[in-house]
Image: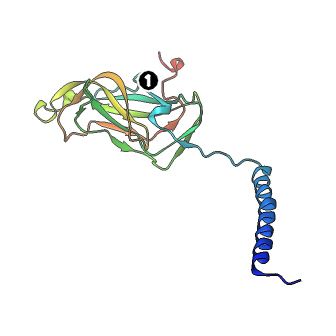
Amino acid sequence: MRLNSRMARRAGGAVIAVCAAIAIPAAAMAATDGPAAPAAISRCTVSNLDIWAGVPGNQGMEQNAIPIEISDISARPCTLRGLPRALAVTSTGRQLGDAANTSGDRSRLITLRYGQTANFSLDITDVTIFPHSSCDQVTAAGLSVYAPGDSDSQFIPLAIRVCGKYGLQYMTASAVGNGAGVPDLADVG
């Protein structure tokens, strides 16, 4: 029996259909047989964090250290890497003076699970030591704080004296560390 081109095309199409019928379910089974790959942990953002100020500690004559707490309030873990950003703002969100300088290890990776807290210290110099002409001392309505790597901030209501003019660095934010930064009440007193 001689195959013409029409019969050859039909036979070839049938072979391709049979191979596809075998290969597709086999590929699907192979993809689901093994253990599931762990889901990647995403970067922490304002939407899954609560950022708040702890009780001021380590107050000196011209310096005040405020622990800034970063708590995971989402159902999924997230990571923090880099340095936070903090600036004093008015009640309408307008920035007052320069943003805080940052210092510390920006490569450290911190993973937060639901309910866990990380912290950084915001050191603020008493701005009354600066001449009014170079500082323009005003009372801020609070702080606008950015988690490391985030482009959105959270507002922390905190009436503090700050410089309204740019050019004086009076705040420094440390690198984020594990755990809450609020002082242990057993250490107070």
Q: What element does badge 1 sit on?
A: loop
Q: Amino acid at mark 1?
A: Gly
Position of residue 27 measured from the top left corner of the image (x, y, whole percent): 76, 58
Q: Residue at x 68, y 46 (%)?
A: 38
From the viewer's perspective, is residue 46 above or below residue 42? above
Q: Residue at x 57, y 30 (%)?
A: 116
| Lateral position of residue 174 relative to residue 159, left or right | right
Q: Residue furthest left?
A: 133
> Looking at the figure, which quarter contains the N terminus?
bottom right
The answer to which of 157 and 131 lies nearer the viewer is 157
- Asked which quadrant contains residue 153, the reply is top left
Position of residue 162 measured from the top left corner of the image (x, y, whole percent): 24, 29
Check disc 1 and report the residue beneath it.
54
- Asked which quadrant contains residue 65, the reply is top left
The answer to which of 167 and 20 lies nearer the viewer is 20
Q: Residue furthest right?
A: 1
From the viewer's perspective, is residue 10 above or below residue 58? below
Q: Residue at x 79, y 59 (%)?
A: 21
Query: Number of marks in the image?
Result: 1
From the viewer's perspective, is residue 137 above or below residue 186? below
Position of residue 128 measured from the top left corner of the image (x, y, whole percent): 20, 27
Position of residue 178 measured from the top left corner of the image (x, y, whole percent): 54, 36
The answer to which of 87 and 160 lies nearer the viewer is 87
